[in-house]
Image (tube, coloured by chain):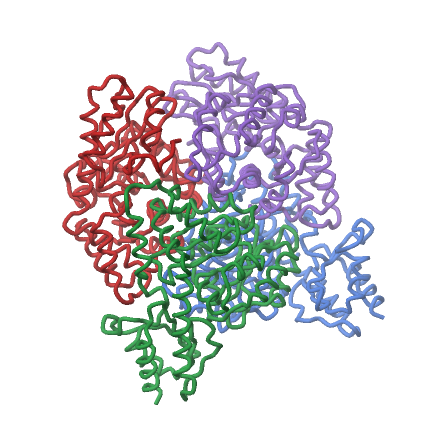
Chain colours: A purple, B blue, C green, D red
Amino acid sequence: MHADVSAMPEHFFASDNVSGIHPKILEAIARANHGHAPAYGEDRWTEKAIQVVRDTFDTDAEVFFTFNGTGANVIGLAASTRPHHAVLCAKSAHLWTSECAAPERFFGGKLIPIEDRFGKLTPEAVAPYLKDARGVHTAQARVISLTQPTEWGTLYTVDEIRAFADFAASYGLLLHIDGARYANAAAALDVTFAELTTHTGVDILSLGGTKNGLLGGEAVLILNDELATEAAYARKQAMQLASKMRFIAAQFLAYLEEDLWRVLAKHANSMAQRLARALGDVRGLEFVCPVECNMLFPRLPPRALESLQNDFYFYAWDQDEGIARWVTSFDTTEEDIDSFAVAVKDVLS
Amino acid sequence: MHADVSAMPEHFFASDNVSGIHPKILEAIARANHGHAPAYGEDRWTEKAIQVVRDTFDTDAEVFFTFNGTGANVIGLAASTRPHHAVLCAKSAHLWTSECAAPERFFGGKLIPIEDRFGKLTPEAVAPYLKDARGVHTAQARVISLTQPTEWGTLYTVDEIRAFADFAASYGLLLHIDGARYANAAAALDVTFAELTTHTGVDILSLGGTKNGLLGGEAVLILNDELATEAAYARKQAMQLASKMRFIAAQFLAYLEEDLWRVLAKHANSMAQRLARALGDVRGLEFVCPVECNMLFPRLPPRALESLQNDFYFYAWDQDEGIARWVTSFDTTEEDIDSFAVAVKDVLS
Amino acid sequence: MHADVSAMPEHFFASDNVSGIHPKILEAIARANHGHAPAYGEDRWTEKAIQVVRDTFDTDAEVFFTFNGTGANVIGLAASTRPHHAVLCAKSAHLWTSECAAPERFFGGKLIPIEDRFGKLTPEAVAPYLKDARGVHTAQARVISLTQPTEWGTLYTVDEIRAFADFAASYGLLLHIDGARYANAAAALDVTFAELTTHTGVDILSLGGTKNGLLGGEAVLILNDELATEAAYARKQAMQLASKMRFIAAQFLAYLEEDLWRVLAKHANSMAQRLARALGDVRGLEFVCPVECNMLFPRLPPRALESLQNDFYFYAWDQDEGIARWVTSFDTTEEDIDSFAVAVKDVLS
Amino acid sequence: MHADVSAMPEHFFASDNVSGIHPKILEAIARANHGHAPAYGEDRWTEKAIQVVRDTFDTDAEVFFTFNGTGANVIGLAASTRPHHAVLCAKSAHLWTSECAAPERFFGGKLIPIEDRFGKLTPEAVAPYLKDARGVHTAQARVISLTQPTEWGTLYTVDEIRAFADFAASYGLLLHIDGARYANAAAALDVTFAELTTHTGVDILSLGGTKNGLLGGEAVLILNDELATEAAYARKQAMQLASKMRFIAAQFLAYLEEDLWRVLAKHANSMAQRLARALGDVRGLEFVCPVECNMLFPRLPPRALESLQNDFYFYAWDQDEGIARWVTSFDTTEEDIDSFAVAVKDVLS
């Protein structure tokens, strides 16, 4: 897929999970590394971090810290479904394309992929999938899962999320959000987590941290009371219950306090904008969808794409269509962007 | 179970996962926190750490880093079984008692618990479970899983492991070791990991790190070539594939280089011996099984046990029998031991 | 296991599922074979059969016809559990020994085998398994499953079942009965199905039919309202929803009307008693447990056992212990018994 | 969906599983009802039936009789997949739409629905789903499942099946056929089962019987040697192992001997043709796809459709599109067809 990584610039555009740990996060881990603490989340860091998540989201939701995003998604879905249920999601959703059937294996039911437009679904696109449940023969739709931001870096507005929550509720369904890059969405929309989540009627949220400066850690928020017990056991069964939980909790404390999450996400988003601006008028390149957070999807001539990949580490998103994916991170610098932009222009000239 | 933890001494005897991160491990994480690195284990730290594990174990086994021990166990078993298979384990095994049916849920087959003696099984105890497979009606025994050290802190010698590997092979079965505290076993037996594992014929090992000074990280070693492909997918499906893998790999690099694992385990073991010696002659207390690594199982009068729990954080292992479990860690100090011993004597006098 | 079956008497003692279809059952199938009928249980035979089951059991329980007994058990358990639950059963239970991990695979949780005495459990034997649920680490006991009659042909009295139902309820658990030979139990105890089930507080029943004269058909009774929806989907997912359901329903109509079930079971039971009487005083043979319904467990010298197996088709229950299992059926004749008894005496003399 | 069924003609057009048992099949059951027989398929009827299946298909494939079609499909797929695998099928496939996630629940992996044209897939439609397997992140395509005839009653020719088998093999995939109405396909194509299956390179076949005159019974043919052991256990775990197997085997003996299957299927197919001819020129009705076997999909004005459903039992296939589904059976008579045709014309005039 790419040439020798060690010979490349030290900052990549492959994904935001190629970045490291933000210094404040690492400091928080070091500070929590003092003495002994009860295991499995019975410690005071976890207690406090849960409270901070609740305060930030303006909710008394149950909060479950997990190791990674697939784990967070699977726990949220397992807590809200039985094996005869179906989860409706975008055809481009990570859940459908990139979790190697972990959801199906773990919760036992069905994912149903729905054609999306640059990652986004609409109630209108989902509605036809809700009309035809023929009794026990059909897996029963139970959850609508949206990705925010989508895999194409596009965003649902607060109003769109609220409309989806109302739509789901009107069918007796639950609304799940895969928020692996949730900070980037909230920062781009310039709203609080509470506005985007609790106040819109989201039932279950996978709140990412790893892609925005954490060593590793995500959280599942169960905003629907009825599902909380299930989630606690699901986390254990999903092998996502950390014994030294304090070190995930400590990361979230640093992440949420003083809105570090927003500072980092805003920076990543602005780096994407900088790159989009730098390449906006370049001949031979077009962005196939709006650059709304920290992801860019340029269409390039195949040869240019490959040539760039020799020097920079990023993925071809759709080889046949000549579409690449570039992702900026909390630690992407202006120099990274500028020198990359020069290289892109070079290869296209 | 216990009174106010924050009022207790800062070192606990509840488990070795109440301890924190060894400074060298944390330094290794900090050192790896430089620039970007390919995700999901495609980075150079992971490449190197795998090689170091292989060198340490004198094997070319496939190595899979995971988040936690239940994950490691489940991946190892999932890679080696089909849903019509059974895994034979001790009735006291973590696998059976403390993983909330995660193995059954994930691999779909059967765990069969066998009566053990202070955690240990013998081929003689296992053999009766192998004679009666009535075709498709019975889950087919496929794996024997031993815990080393056992949940009672007892040890299998190198010869005992080798005999079990031969026994398993003679039935066409695989030998799995749950080594959440593997370092403590190897240190206590004064053998290398290679001698205890590769040279005895173990097929699959869950190699613990978290309980011996890591922030969090375990490894699955697949010493049997045929199982490796399965394990790679099983790790992903088991939600144990870290995106920022370099930070688990870096921990293992520090853990294995210069035998840090052994230094830490030896210390924990010696603290247990110190406590055993200090309380050896105390009236009203007996250790119900030999203290072979870093775990002690004293029988105490119920009232004494409860009284101690008011001041020290540890578990009653068997309330009815008045048996407690005390676990020492890499960071347990001589002062911890000595002042605890005094307190125990006090409460018994 | 046995010599040429075609050279043996046409009636076997291997199991009651070696028997065929009672003529009245076959007639009922033929009578239902008229015209078209809605599929999947929407037909009038099924509607009527469900009503007859309800009347017979004096309940308004949900009733689900299934193909076979493993299916019935799995549906009942799947409807009443989540994957973090455990089902407690006898170590000798079919569920544990003979369903090839189908329950674990399908419901995802844990079966916990408990030492039994000739198939029977007591609340006292079960109680220790209920005291030690350590939060999310342990699969949570949810169902106690008893086999009636047990695999050893022993019976729980109405009072024992009621005591178990009360015991289960006092722990917030459900009581499941595997009644593959339920007719034999009710006939032997001389009680109605209602007295043995609904009036004692059973929550879920697998009601056998196949072993007592049906071509094939079992029923799951969900006597606990909360579980019914789950069961309907579980039957479909468990691949136990017959399209031509009327032909299972018709069998149950014939089976329950005019107490055919009792007539057939009583006969089978009496044949077992006849054999027990005939061999009661024979030297070299003892029945290792009371003969309470249609199953006998004689201990014989190994050589005698093998010699008998050359001429008669039955199983060695425990080869090492020299214990055989003989099962009588609805169509076992007095001649079958008498000539078999002679043969047994011969081989022992 | 429909009005009072009991007031309707006794033959329905809802599905072929509303039909009963062909007299020869019922006779075969009655003939097998003699004496005792070893259970679980160890009997001579099963032995013979397996041989007859093999002879009919010109293969030495492993043959597993099952209760129903979902069971057959799930066993075939479970035998050929691991949980990280994906099965590619038509979006209209029964597997995807009508098995309530039983496949996902049982084998643990992913079904991937592909847009079809009146039920049919082409290698060209499947190919794009095979190019993008990103290592462990994506469920790995392992099986292509075709439905023959499709849910729309359309057929794959022998050449099309062979081309698909070659296509699958070229990607290292297996070809599975869901043949719930396989007899109708072979009869319509005027080929033997061997020509349609073994000689084209099919790996796994679900061979239906229930919809074409059996009381209940299907068979899984595993034409690929490597999968046979898995299938045997999968049948048991899938709760599809009949204890009184002889009564399924006896049905298949009668079904395959003297080509009863073909006689019955040809009749059903010809009844569909008769109906198609009778309504071919009727104004206000068109068949939306070719009538190739025993299924018709007419488009009717919604009011006409509903009016007809008051008097005849059949399903609206797509309410919004005004498409109904009519299915003829082995026992549909010319009078059924003719009087129904009159009624349709009436309602449209």
Q: Nearer the viewer, residue A51 or D239?
A: D239
Look at the picture and state if B206 lies above or below C158. Answer: above
Number of numbered markers: 0
In the rendered image, which quarter contains the C terminus of chain B? bottom right
* Image-based side of D278 in relation to A220, left or right: left
Work out whether residue D204 can be spotted: no
* Image-based side of D144 in relation to D27, left or right: right
Residue A69 in picture, x, y percent from top left: 56, 36
Look at the picture and state if D333 lies above or below C167. Answer: above
Q: Nearer the viewer, residue C159 or C59?
A: C59
* Location of residue C346 by image quarter: bottom left
Q: Residue at x 48, y 19 (%)?
A: A343
Q: Residue at x 26, y 17 (%)?
A: D349
* Image-based side of B297 in relation to A239, left or right: right
In the rendered image, which quarter contains the N terminus of chain B? bottom right
Q: Nearer the viewer, residue B70 or D68?
A: D68
Look at the picture and state if C115 lies above or below A70. Answer: below
Look at the picture and state if C119 lies above or below A19. Answer: below
Residue A301 in picture, x, y percent from top left: 38, 18
Residue B81 in picture, x, y percent from top left: 43, 55
* Location of residue D291 by image quarter: top left
Work out whether residue A331 can be spotted: yes
Residue A17 in picture, x, y percent from top left: 55, 33
Q: Nearer the viewer, residue A2 or C72?
A: C72
